[in-house]
Amino acid sequence: MSGSFPMNGGNGIYSYTKNSEFQREALNTIKEMIDMAIAEKLDVKHLTSTSRSIHLADLGCSVGPNTFIAMQNVIAAAEKKYYAKSLSSEKLEFQVFFNDHISNDFNTLFAALPVD
């Protein structure tokens, strides 16, 4: 199947933002699995040996707040592993790159950016 099928942007009744509860629930369901995978597999010592900056990419971020929930889950798990290893008291810096269909409504995505 060829073609592009981006999500409906904006905050309207048919938007992805208003119709992504099942996806949000899936994120909550797999959070523990993500935590365990990062705890077992992420080599924070090697990853932070030259920098305290970690880069993440969401390749299919869509347009809703679920994108931020997913990235917050990954960041929290990485921080937990880093500080549990007591590698440094320096705070980690995360750079997150969002990428999806060019026609996606990135204005709505960034308007939903969490304040904290």
Image: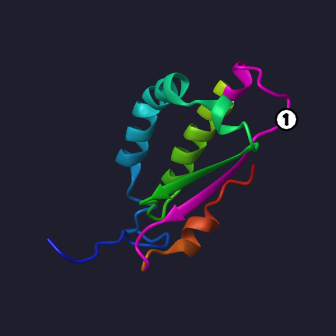
Q: Which residue is mark 1?
A: 90
Mark 1 crowdedness (10 Å alpha carbons): few <14, some 14-19, many ≥20: few
Q: Residue at x 40, y 73 (%)?
A: 101
* Quadrant hosting residue 27: top left
* Nearer the observer, 64 or 81: 81
Does residue 113 lie above or below 81 as drawn? below
Give the position of the N terminus as an image quadrant: bottom left
| Magenta span contains residue 84 | yes
Residue extending furthest toward the left: 1
Q: Secondary structure at mark 1?
A: loop
* Nearer the observer, 115 or 98: 98
Residue type of the residue flagged with mark 1: Glu
Q: In the rendered view, does 85 fall on the left or right side of 26?
A: right
Magenta range is: 82-102
Q: Residue at x 75, y 44 (%)?
A: 51
Where does the image place residue 22, in percent across and percent down from the top left? 35, 46
Where does the image place residue 12, in percent across and percent down from the top left? 45, 71
Where does the image place residue 107, in percent across and percent down from the top left? 58, 75
* Quadrant hosting residue 108: bottom right
Q: Residue at x 71, y 38 (%)?
A: 48
Where does the image place residue 105, in percent across and percent down from the top left? 49, 75
| Magenta span contains residue 30 | no
Q: In the rendered view, does 50 fall on the left or right side of 81?
A: right
